[in-house]
Image: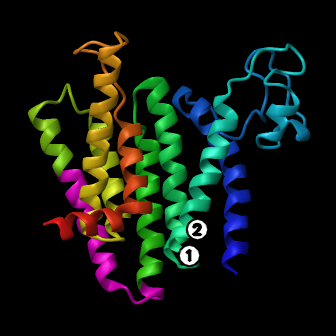
Amino acid sequence: MSAFIDAVAAVLGLCVGSFLNVVIWRLPRRESLSRPPSHCPGCNARLRPWENVPVLSWVVLRGRCRSCHMRISIRYPVVEVLTAGLWTAAAVRIGPHWELADLCVFFAVLVAISGIDLDHQIVPSRIVYPAAGASIVLLGVATVADHRERAGVDALAGGLLGFGLLFLIHVVQPQGMGFGDVRLAGLIGLNVGWLGLARVGVALLGGFLLGTLVGLALMATGRAGRKTRIPFGPFLAAGAVLAVLWGGPLVNLWLNRG
């Protein structure tokens, strides 16, 4: 049963990743996510069904449009493989439990937000708010179905903790911390908090450490300066994934050292 769930998660992750590419491209441009159907952004040629097969179509077409031969970014298969990998990792780590559905949705949201933030330096509230509502419903179902009232309370507390901590940073230095990141931290705290409040700290600290290391590397190579704005959403997302998949061992390691 576990192997079957892992395989289903991988296949569904590929399909969802294909849709996330549409979200990343269209949502910031305020375009419909359903109309027109998938098409080449260069010549507007409508994609045939076989050209929409995740990863495989990009490989067969050699990363180019069949009509105008415009290059198709490698980001498309990367997003599909990344989503499939995250869903499979969640299935392996969490197992066949009710919260798996929430974490898969959560990971998909993190991929979409990261892609948009990298392109436009925004964390869309049109994604964060519906995602928070979906998480509250899905985690509420998991709380009742598995009789994990403590986990439900921790999820709500984690959401308030994540939002509150980054809100304080935003108030002190609004230029350095956008409010979109504050909202995202609340969403991360909600989902990661379900697995334990200590993991919220792992998620946020991990995000800050990754952001700092990448920022220092960019400055050292001359690709960024002290005042260069670097999207923080992807680092928060990476910290959240770290907390979900390996937060338990990291917390235990820290406690044992203490």
User: To which quarter of the image does residue 168 belong?
Assistant: top left
Q: Amino acid at mark 2?
A: Ala
| Quadrant where the C terminus is found in the figure | bottom left
- Helix, strand or loop: magenta stretch: helix
Q: Amino acid at mark 1?
A: Gly
Graded by Cα atoms within 10 Å as few (under 14), some (14 to 19) or many (20 or more), the crowding at tag 2 reads many
Side of 102 relative to 238 (left or right): right
Side of 86 relative to 243 (left or right): right
User: To which quarter of the image does residue 220 belong?
Assistant: top left
Percent across and percent down for residue 111 are 52, 44
Most extreme residue toward the front is 257
Residue at mark 2: 91
User: How many numbered callouts?
Assistant: 2
> What stretch of residues is rendered in magenta?
144-164
Side of 170 relative to 93 (left or right): left
Graded by Cα atoms within 10 Å as few (under 14), some (14 to 19) or many (20 or more), the crowding at tag 1 reads some
Percent across and percent down for residue 21 are 64, 37
Identity of the residue drawn at 45% across and 24% down:
120
